[in-house]
Amino acid sequence: MLVKVFGSAVFGIEATTITVEVNIDKGIGYHLVGLPDNAVRESSYRISAALNNNSYKLPGKKIIINMAPADIRKEGAAYDLTLAIGILAASNQIKSTNIDNYIIMGELSLDGSLQPIKGALPIAIKAREEGFKHFILPKENAKEAAIVDNLEVLGVDNILEVINHFNDDQKIKPTVVDTRAEFYKNIDFPEFDFSDVKGQESIKRCMEIAAAGGHNIILIGPPGSGKTMLAKRLPSILPPMTLHEALETTKIHSVVGQTKNYGLLYQRPFRSPHHTISDVALVGGGQYPQPGEISLSHNGVLFLDELPEFKRTVLEVMRQPLEDREVTISRAKFTVTYPSSFMLVASMNPSPSGFFNDPNSPMTSSPQEMQRYLSKISGPLLDRIDIHIEVTPVPFEKLSEERKGESSVEIRKRVTAAREIQSNRFKKLENVHYNAQMNVKQIREFCKLSHESLALLKTAMKQLNLSARAYDRILKVARTIADLANEKNIFPDHIAEAIQYRSLDRDGWLG
């Protein structure tokens, strides 16, 4: 007897439906075709043990299973449940009248219990698109898949529950999640708060500007000056994720299996990889491509602590994704694209010792040593960072103050208001949502300067020896400062503040 059941494969962040055809005929043997990898081939042992331990059995006949389309490689153990239910249906051990309305996925243990799978959300989205009515999967993934409406999600702990469901002995209760209610209930609970930071008012202001315009930022200062503490609190002042952004972010995390029992991700991601990371781990890829850290920080913050300690090759592969806000990984047989629209926050010491030109520290580095240290970061990478800010140590008087600083919620209100101004400004442009995304043409259109502002910028560029690349960055940052002040035009004081945030562009910075 021939039976068709349906599973799914994930490529990039999109799913493809896989048709599993099971044919049982006279003879003896178990033949699995359709480009399965070793984990899929080994499924026969897991299926056999799971069925035996639940009073069912593999039929002692010739079993031929085809996984179509046959030219797509099938990976992982998530097809165990699909194959097992197909075999049971083809051997008349369960009823198969409406089995073609189901997508079935799950990894089997030898006792018949189910292990969680990766990519439940993309699979659920594809299932709804293709008109499937039900999705059976492990209970740990049910909450995540139930985000998708108009699809009945059935979370199960054991293969016996699936067998009883098809035999009408005991129906599985659907998992129901009110996505919007859950989303808006969990939207506003930052773990780290800016009120914890003592002093550093100018740096907080700088972080507020970076958050309002989506600007990449680098913090330069000695150890213990609060660079990491400030960076960890940046997500708390970013505007709350929209439902669309939350779905997109959850989809990427689902592919790498980081959403078990969570459902929708409500907080913006904050990723802080160690400086020993490889270029594949950062950008994504591998033999069977997976998203890297830059994609896992999509719609959030990627924090690179001690930037010069990262291998130069690792930092260079990040240049193009920073510009394009997506990364494309090409292999001989296929190409996958992962979104990577993130805010880059980097931190570094000003010298190898960390205390360059600090009169209170005996540890000093010569200008040559410092130049060599800074040259580990390439010009093209710095070109993509809009704001450079020096962080100075906090004096004892500030540290011992009882008074708390401004909270993240108050700062976020101003940031959100500035982002709304930008959304209205760029509503006719498809891929531009905030100031940092403007190209040269849009800068000329939206960052027009008065004669006074232009004169100030010209003087600053001459006197401070600012490089040509600083020009556009200053205009972008000045536009954000004007938006925070709810001003239509860019005034000289906005330009003056933006000029302060280009430390590494000044020729005299080393002296």
Image (cartoon, rainbow, N blue to C red):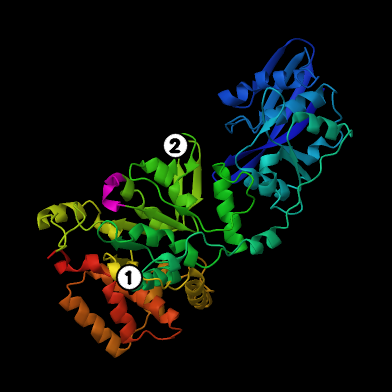
Q: Position of residue 253 (x, y in %)?
A: 55, 47
Question: What residue is drawn where x is 71% and y is 45%?
Answer: 127
The furthest residue to the top = 27
Mark 1 lies on residue: 398
> Which label's residue is closer to the chain start, 1 or 2?
2
- Closest to the observer: 386 or 126? 386
Q: Position of residue 191 (x, y in %)?
A: 51, 59
Location of residue 61 (image quadrant): top right
**Residue 478 included in the magenta stretch of the image:** no
Q: CA distance from mark 1 to mark 2?
A: 48 Å
Q: Position of residue 327 (x, y in %)?
A: 44, 50
Mark 2 lies on residue: 286
- Specify start and end residues of the magenta stretch as a single range: 306-313
Q: Is residue 259 left or right of residue 83?
A: left
Q: Is residue 269 left or right of residue 31?
A: left
- Quadrant location, the N terminus: top right
- Closest to the observer: 209 or 130? 209
Identify which amino acid the numbered label 2 is placed on.
Answer: Gly
Q: Residues within 10 Å of mark 1 (few under 14, many from 20)?
A: few
- Residue 265 lies, with reference to residue 448, above or below; the image says above
Question: What residue is drawn where x is 80% and y is 41%?
Answer: 101
Q: Secondary structure at mark 1?
A: helix
- Quadrant location, the C terminus: bottom left
The furthest residue to the bottom = 451
